[in-house]
Image (cartoon, rainbow, N blue to C red):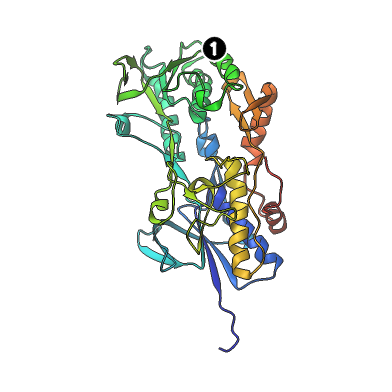
Amino acid sequence: MPGAIMEQNILIIGSGFAGLWSALSAVRLLDQHDRTDVHVTLLAPQAELRIRPRFYEPNVHDMRAPLLDLFAVTGVCFVQGLALNIDAEGRKVTYRNAEGDEAALGYDRLILASGSQLFRPAVPGLAEHAFDVDQIEQAARLEQHLFALASQPESISRNTVVVAGGGFTGIETATELPARLRAILGDDAEVRVIVIDRGAQVGAALGDDIRPAILEASRELGIEWRLGRLVAAVDAQGVVLDDDQRIDAGTVIWTAGFHASGLTEQISAPRDASGRLQVDSYLKVEGMAYIYAAGDTARAATDELGNFSVMSCQHAIPLGRHAGNNAAAELIGVAPQVYSQPKYVTCLDLGAWGAVYTEGWDRQQKLIGAEAKTLKTQINTQWIYPPAADRAVALAAADPSIPVA
């Protein structure tokens, strides 16, 4: 029909922090310009935001937020399925739907927000015997295992947990464990939590300013550290380290390292050591005309000082807001917004001891103990959750111009 408007589609892969906010931000811009000819489609296995930063906590089955009502009021088309293949030349994505059949979705702009997963090296016995808190199913499996410890005879092995990896996730997991274990085994249980880390110092990757708080919390909570060591093997009764030391433990939790979604490997563009795609200041993937990336799949410059985004919701949310806005902006011919996030903060949970809050890439301590714990609780239980299923409220929250920490 002469003069008919061609309908276009922005396809987003992933319903995590970056995917959700990409969708809402794209709808927001289209709404502002009264463009009903551009559709926003989100492809993901579930219509829910899984609150991954909280998976080290108990009651993990509650840490998901349904999204169907939010999608309904904002006009986001949700397609349930697992993305399998990205055809960049043909501009389509093949996926497996809920019935197990394969289908395809075309796109005019693609936003890859498929997240990351725990890196699992070829350590003997790791796959068979270790637990993790990477995905909600794995975290729930760990929680069931911890509850089952109560039915086992009292022993040092039963009461001992080894946490492999002393980074952010490892520290939060380890410092939460004494309270979790005593809630299950009894207040008088002699629990033992041991962190294995290859670093020469406690919290080496987090910097000097944050270390005193980690050390004090570790002392008060009884967390032990084995520094400069790697896990060489895992079995049903514990671990063997790379110096042949054996630690008997009924529970081993792997937290060492994350890698971007394998879908990044299907895009012919530069990637970093973690598999993240290099993006420009508008979050378009380098060398790709129609593909953007956000969240853990994107390596984006946060400032002009040489700092880049990290795999966290702190960066995923604003990255999503910008990617969605800019994909829509390109399609309707309006100016995109440059992504910039010069402020960087860290709020590290340290279990019953409290928390520590820092600002800057050098992590200068600002809050500590109970005061920082209050802030951490607000972040984890309020700030990172999706907005209410109210169109005006949700779209206003998706504005990429909102200042972010």
Relative horizontal placement of residue 337, taking residue 152 as reference (left or right): right
Q: Residue at x 48, y 27 (%)?
A: 170
**Position in image of residue 14 (x %, y %):** 49, 53
Which residue ends up furthest to the left in the rendered image? 124
**Position in image of residue 400 (x %, y %):** 67, 53
Whether residue 333 is visible: yes
Mark 1 lies on a secondary structure that is helix
Camera-side residue of 334 and 350: 334
Q: How many marks?
A: 1
Position of 264 relative to 36 (above/below) = above
Examine the image and state in which quarter residue 220 appears. Answer: top right
At label 1, counting other C-alpha atoms closer than 10 Å, the crowd grade (few under 14, some 14-19, many 20 or more) is few
Relative horizontal placement of residue 125, taking residue 358 as reference (left or right): left
Whether residue 69 is visible: no
Examine the image and state in which quarter residue 73 appears. Answer: bottom right
Position of 312 relative to 95 (above/below) = above
**Position in image of residue 316 (x %, y %):** 57, 46
Quarter of the picture containing the C terminus is: top right
Relative horizontal placement of residue 248, taking residue 225 as reference (left or right): left
Examine the image and state in which quarter residue 153 appears. Answer: top left
**Position in image of residue 6 (x %, y %):** 56, 78
Q: Residue at x 59, y 68 (%)?
A: 331
Instruction: Tell me which amino acid carries mark 1.
Output: Arg
Camera-side residue of 390 and 219: 219
Q: Residue at x 31, y 14 (%)?
A: 245
Which residue matches tag 1?
219
Which residue ends up furthest to the front in the rendered image? 305
Q: Residue at x 51, y 48 (%)?
A: 298
Quarter of the picture containing the N terminus is: bottom right
